[in-house]
């Protein structure tokens, strides 16, 4: 069984973006003083933490009529690559059973559970037609609690992609933002990094935190040396 996370990032404006950029010495990058809006873009993202794989599409807006068909198409491709299960429900591990996540046995026949979909708690994600489609295809949507969107790892992935694509840049139009975001996705997928709890990323953060604490780290073994 696979775990995927879905989120919609943005909107990203086609204006000068904060961040570092490269420029010749003595010739810093210059930004226009006029505030000219070139439109906005969003990034539909489907992320698999176990492998680091990202499926994404840039759009100018993300209403249900845009998000739902895209998500169904991407999940159909994912499911096509997931091996079919012939093991009876009762013989599967608990995480692979519908009852584990529903809290009760399914009240109607369902196919084997093959994908868990981590999703934000938005009204459009509860659309009955979409939820029933997920169930019919062996996908269990799991909604993050209110104020718990940080549990959706797609948000962390989107911050990385947005920084790679836009930091220090000045896109002129929404189409340019979309192209840069999708290029960043392609670059990431060329050498993806799996996400794990308590993994190497956390270890790096802990080392950085200890460095910021400062101090010499010196200790005194015999306090009598300083006695009057």
Image: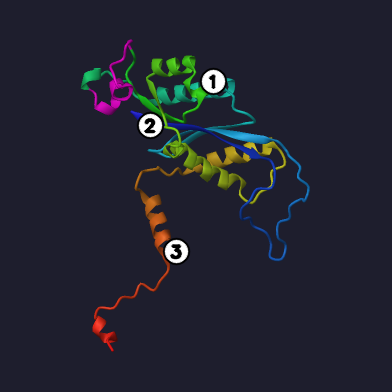
The magenta stretch is 92-109
Q: Which residue is mark 1?
A: 69
Q: Of callouts 3 and 1, which one flags the residue occurring earlier in the amino acid sequence?
A: 1
Q: In which quadrant will I find the N terminus?
A: top left
Residue at (32% x, 18% y) in the render: 112
Q: Secondary structure at mark 2?
A: strand
Q: Nearer the viewer, residue 137 or 99?
A: 99
- Image quarter in which the C terminus is found: bottom left
Q: Secondary structure at mark 3?
A: helix
| 97 up-or-down from 39: above or below | above
Q: CA distance from mark 1 to mark 2?
A: 20 Å
**Crowd class of label 1 (few under 14; some 14 to 19; many from 20; radius 10 Å):** few
Q: Classify 191 as above or below 174.
A: below
Element assignment for label 1: helix
Identify the residue at horizontal 48%, vertical 36% (top origin).
Answer: 54
Q: Residue furthest bottom?
A: 228
Pointer 3: what residue? Answer: 212
- Between the residue at mark 3 and the residue at mark 1, the CA separation in whole angstroms equals 46 Å
Question: Residue 105 magenta-drawn?
Answer: yes
Q: Nearer the viewer, mark 3 or mark 2?
A: 3
Return the disc, 1 or 2, that comes first in the chain's sequence: 2
Q: How is the image coloured?
A: rainbow
At x 59%, y 27%, the residue is: 62
Count of labels shown?
3
Would you name the residue on which mark 2 appears?
A: 3
Q: Position of residue 171 (x, y in %)?
A: 69, 43
Q: Is residue 183 magenta?
A: no
Q: Is residue 14 left or right of residue 122?
A: right
- Residue 169, compared with residue 26, is above or below; it is above
Q: Residue furthest right?
A: 34
Q: Position of residue 92 (x, y in %)?
A: 24, 23
């Amino acid at each position: 069984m696979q775990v995927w996370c879905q989120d919609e990032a943005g909107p990203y404006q086609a204006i000068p973006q904060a961040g570092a950029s490269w420029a010749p010495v003595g010739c810093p990058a210059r930004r226009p003083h006029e505030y000219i809006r070139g439109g906005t873009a969003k990034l539909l993202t489907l992320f698999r933490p176990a492998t680091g794989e990202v499926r994404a599409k840039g759009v100018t807006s993300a209403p249900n009529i845009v998000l739902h068909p895209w998500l169904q198409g991407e999940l159909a491709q994912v499911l096509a690559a997931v091996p079919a299960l012939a093991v009876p429900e009762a013989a599967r591990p608990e995480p692979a059973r519908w009852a584990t996540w529903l809290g009760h046995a399914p009240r109607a026949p369902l196919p084997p559970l093959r994908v868990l979909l981590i999703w934000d708690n938005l009204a459009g994600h509860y659309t009955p037609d979409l939820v029933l489609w997920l169930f019919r295809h062996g996908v269990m949507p799991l909604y993050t609690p209110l104020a718990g969107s940080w549990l959706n790892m797609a948000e962390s992935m989107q911050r990385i992609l947005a920084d790679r694509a836009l930091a220090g840049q000045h896109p002129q139009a929404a189409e340019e933002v979309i192209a840069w975001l999708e290029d960043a996705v392609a670059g990431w997928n060329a050498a993806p990094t799996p996400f794990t709890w308590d993994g190497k990323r956390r270890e790096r953060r802990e080392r950085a935190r200890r460095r910021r604490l400062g101090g010499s780290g010196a200790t005194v073994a015999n306090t009598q040396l300083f006695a009057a």
